[in-house]
Image (cartoon, rainbow, N blue to C red):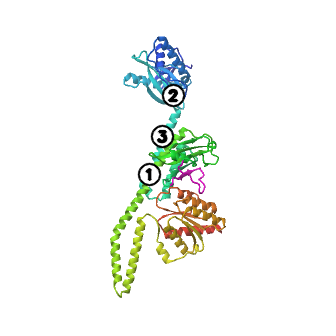
Amino acid sequence: MPTEDQQPNSGARCYELRGSQPLNESERAALARFTITDRSAELTPIQRSDENPSASAEIRSSDRAARALELLGQGVGIVETNGEIVWMNQGLARQAPETMRRFADCCVDAIAAWRRSKATAATLRASFRAAGAWFEAVMTPLRRDGEGPIEGAVALLVDATATRRLQDRLDAIDQVGVELLQFDADAIRSLNAAERLRALEGRVIAATRSVLGFDHFEYRLTDRRTGQLELVFCSGLVPLGIGERIFARGEGNGFSGIVATTGDSVLCAETDSDPRYIKGLPGAHSSLTVPLRLHDRVIGVLNTESTETDSFDDEDRIGAELLGRYVALSLNILDMLVAERCETHRTLLANLGREATTPLEQIADDARLLRSLEDQGLAQAMAARLLGNVAKVDELLRSSTAGPRGILGADDYLREGVRDPVFEGRTVLVADDEDSIRRTVRAVLEQQGCVVSELDNGTSAITAIREAAHAGKPFDLVISDVRMPDANGYEVFRATKDAHPATPVMLMTAFGYDPNHSIVRSSQEGLHCFLFKPFQVSQLLEESRKALTEHASRKE
């Protein structure tokens, strides 16, 4: 055993490391009483025996204890009150002098605590950092007899570097998680859906990369109506192809479907040999999928993949599960802020509708009275206009209280009939499952001279886009709603770009949350613009004019 005589420690205490000296009777007894369980070794715990029929049996027990302690990978030693390590096993002897000095320090502090108060716990723990690693010392008192004075400590030294590293990582995740939950409500309310998601997306992706170290990952949320796992945030993974979907189901939907259904994480060390894996990252060989939990409910999944085999471990799983909870909470807070604004909007419109009812009725009564007068041509015309305007205002109020939908100013524009030659003969596809929106957009564009194809679902739109491109007559412009029952706006956008990359695409959505991330994802890949309902007809025409002009310049 190495020895180090009279080594100073912070100028306060000296140590003598005596190595494996023969143990006296009290030291043997202390070792026999010291209970140790090593989870990583297949050793039976050394337990204290309260019934020793003879002194020789006690010595044999302590000898077995000493031999067992020598076999442990952790360090074990006996430290006297002056800081001298009078006995150590091989595990402790292998440690650097700095580590042994800190180990002895912890024992001296424990001895002092036991002597100060009998109420001090019989087993004390202390952590310290030395030689570039973290250690934990587990200490029990050493007495010459059961009730005698404490003359030292028997202590176990455990390398806690991995545990401390995990704790530091979890602390870092907690820190970024708290930051994810810090929303400026007023600022958020002033942003549209795409801007809100884009702001949160940047923070989530940065957090996932920095504290988890993942490069290829995606976050998906479960659509509570359909069970489909909709892509929300993605970094470094190839999105599913057009028409490909995964659901929160245990069969045929990969690890994401399993995790979303069971709530249990799946760590796959070798994806090539697991038939449940659905290809995402090209050349992937391992993956980790964890649930996004909102309280006790699974609302989605975080899936990450790597080109290396066995790239993820339980430490990654624990960290990903913790960050997943913060992401779920942040998305929920975002939804609540949006819902609050929508509810406020509906309440204001409902109040406006109620307060406008009586004045409108009075105007209508006066108009009918004017119309009842005989031989009053001017009065008759005024009455007709008043009744027409009352009906129009009433319809606007009814539409507004139903939600933020519609195209504003369409009636006046169609009545004026001003045309722009940029639109003449251009082919436009309009896809929306709301009849009123679809027909209004069609009427406005046809009035301008466009040839408009009108479809009420995403699947039919994708088919029409592909067929037109295959026939050599791609559409000049595609305008699609974000949310349709069978295909989302991103799928229509992606199908358009795959069929004919030069065709511009505009997406429409009602005010609120974009659950499948269509707008943000499409914006990153070349979306011309998005329109938030209700929008002005002038905005529709301006954006359409820009898109068609740019398209024409690219064709030339």
Quadrant containing the C terminus in the rendered view: bottom right
The label shown at residue 171 is 3
Tell me the amino acid under the disc marked 1: Ile
Question: Considering only vertical position in the picture, is 464 above or below 49?
Answer: below
Residue located 37% across and 23% down the image? 116
For label 3, count other residues whose C-alpha is less than 10 Å away and answer few (under 14), some (14-19) or many (20+).
some
Tell me the amino acid under the disc marked 2: Val
Left or right position of 309 against 369: right
Badge 2 is on which residue?
Answer: 158
Any part of residue 238 in sight: yes
**Spatial CA span between label 2 and label 1:** 42 Å
* Residue situated furthest front in the rendering: 251
Which region shows up in magenta?
Answer: 226-249
Badge 1 is on which residue?
Answer: 333
**Of pointers 3 and 1, the one earlier in the residue sequence:** 3
Across and down, in percent, residue 444 comes to 52, 72
- Whether residue 235 appears in magenta in the rendering, the answer is yes
Query: Pointers 2 and 1 in contact (CB under 8 A)?
Result: no
